[in-house]
Amino acid sequence: MLIVQKYGGTSVGNLERIDEVAKRVIKTKEQGNDVVVVVSAMSGETNKLIEYAKYFTDNPPKREMDLLLSSGERVTSSLLAIALTSKGHKATALTGRQAGIYTDNIHTGARIDKIDANKIKSHLKKGEIVVVAGFQGITNDGEVSTLGRGGSDLSAVAIAGALRADLCEIYTDVDGVYTTDPRIEPKARKLDMISYDEMLELASLGAKVLQNRSVELAKKLDVNLVTRSSFNDNEGTLITKEENIMEQPLVSGIALDKNQARVTLRGVKDEPGIAAKIFNRLAKENINVDMIIQNVGLDGVTNLGFTVPENELDGAKKVMYELNASELLEFDPKIVKVSVVGVGMQSHSGVASKAFDTLAKENINIQMISTSEIKVSMVIDEKYGELAVRALHEAYHLDRAE
Ligand code: ADP
Ligand code: ASP
Ligand code: MG
């Protein structure tokens, strides 16, 4: 088999951990597999590098940030190759450029355009273990780019897709995908399987166990994706096509996104084109707008609210002041989004009302709501985020298998 294994920050968090990872990689290799390893930076390293830059300015040049941030993964990939070699195995470490990962030129949030896997293949052919620095690529102009936070998952899936690997294993510090973040709800239950679509929703709505774009790509390229722990040998969670899952529960999981902020414009002119103007400008600035609420207007004015990722709030503020669309602007970073996800919702009613009931019983005010076929999301005060997760987990009986 050809197996791509990705090890996240805590899995390669120090030299002993890298040594443990080397042993696991060698075991996989000695079972007769070809192995490509993708690594993250040591845990905390990327944040530390960002803080270093922030010492000088709040708005460092993105090109230089990419050069800086890509260094974390270079350290772990070369150290792992050194560890493997010291144990008598042939191993080669490659940067994103050397691995042939080509991206667009959106620095710090690049998308992968194509992968030229020839170099990886030629090393595999020689019987070597290939270790690729995750989270990074190269633009057509030869500039170093990074793929956005958590982007090593995407590197691994993209490489698995390009190599048509039999399996892509994402090793992390939890046994797999749980019904909710086990750090918030210790009663959370590990799922044996989850569909790509549900995993994509959970990941997009805050469950950082997998980066959302990696799930999207795994679905598109039909990559067999498994998340599991690098700290034990427990079986992980298979992320797969919906039709492979026999019993589909009504609700699969609860996600909490703490990285959200709310923007409210009061007294906006209620006339055609206003929303287009506001959201076009935000799009032009690459600001990701999520939930949008607009009320029915009264006396020619209306209120408009939307959410953006917290780290894009400053950008959104700037746009709002420039557009001058409302005299009464409100910016609230102290909110979170809690979401209930499950494909079973499509065919059952009452899932959303149960969520609202549950929060009402806890006296938690819902500021915004948005729903899709397979999710219900609610914006609430950040101080109730974890309480809401636990209450919803209980309400849908997620601690026990159906
Ligand atoms: P890595 O550094 O290995 O990429 P991350 O910290 O990015 O690891 O992701 C793993 C973390 O995701 C876990 O430690 C856990 O706290 C969190 N998490 C959030 N939601 C879930 C969930 N539904 N299932 C499992 N883990 C989750
Ligand atoms: N090191 C990067 C981050 O912390 C990428 C990753 O770990 O996947 O976001
Ligand atoms: Mg991660």
Image (spheres, rainbow, N blue to C red):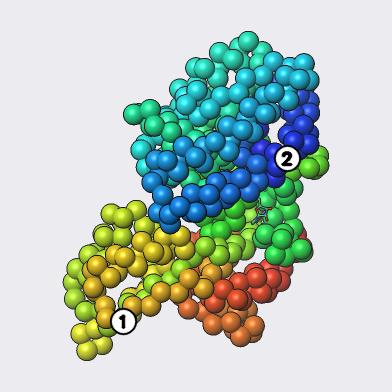
Tell me which residue sits at (74%, 36%) in the image.
15
Q: Nearer the viewer, mark 2 or mark 1?
A: 2
* Place of residue 116 in the rendered image (x, y in percent of width and height, measured from the top left): 45, 22
Q: Quadrant of residue 207?
A: bottom right
**Mark 2 Cα within 10 Å, few/some/many (few <14, many 20+)?**
few
- Residue at mark 2 to residue at mark 1: CA–CA distance: 50 Å
Identify the residue shown where x is 42% and y is 41%: 64
Q: Residue at x 67, y 60 (%)?
A: 180
* 342 shown above or below 18: below
The kind of residue on which mark 1 rests is Leu
Question: Which numbered dot is residue 200?
Answer: none
106 to the left or right of 275:
right
The numbered mark, 2 or 1, whose residue comes first in the sequence reads: 2
- In the displayed orientation, state which residue is furthest to the top: 126
Q: Give the residue furthest to the front.
A: 56
127 shown above or below 18: above
Residue 208 in view = yes
Q: Nearer the viewer, residue 393 or 24?
A: 24
Q: Position of residue 377 (x, y in %)?
A: 51, 68
Q: Which class describes the residues within 10 Å of circle 1: few (<14), some (14-19), or many (20+)?
A: few
- Which quadrant of the rendered structure holds the N terminus? top right
Q: Can you identify the residue that label 1 sits on?
A: 328
Does mark 1's beta carbon lie closer than 8 Å to ligand 1? no
What percent of the width, then of the height, locates residue 391?
Answer: 68, 74
Q: How many marks?
A: 2
Give the quadrant of the C terminus.
bottom right
The location of residue 299, given as percent across then percent down, is: 22, 89
- For badge 2, the amino acid type reads Asn
- Quarter where residue 281 is shown: bottom left
Residue where numbered disc 2 is placed: 14
Q: Secondary structure at mark 1?
A: strand
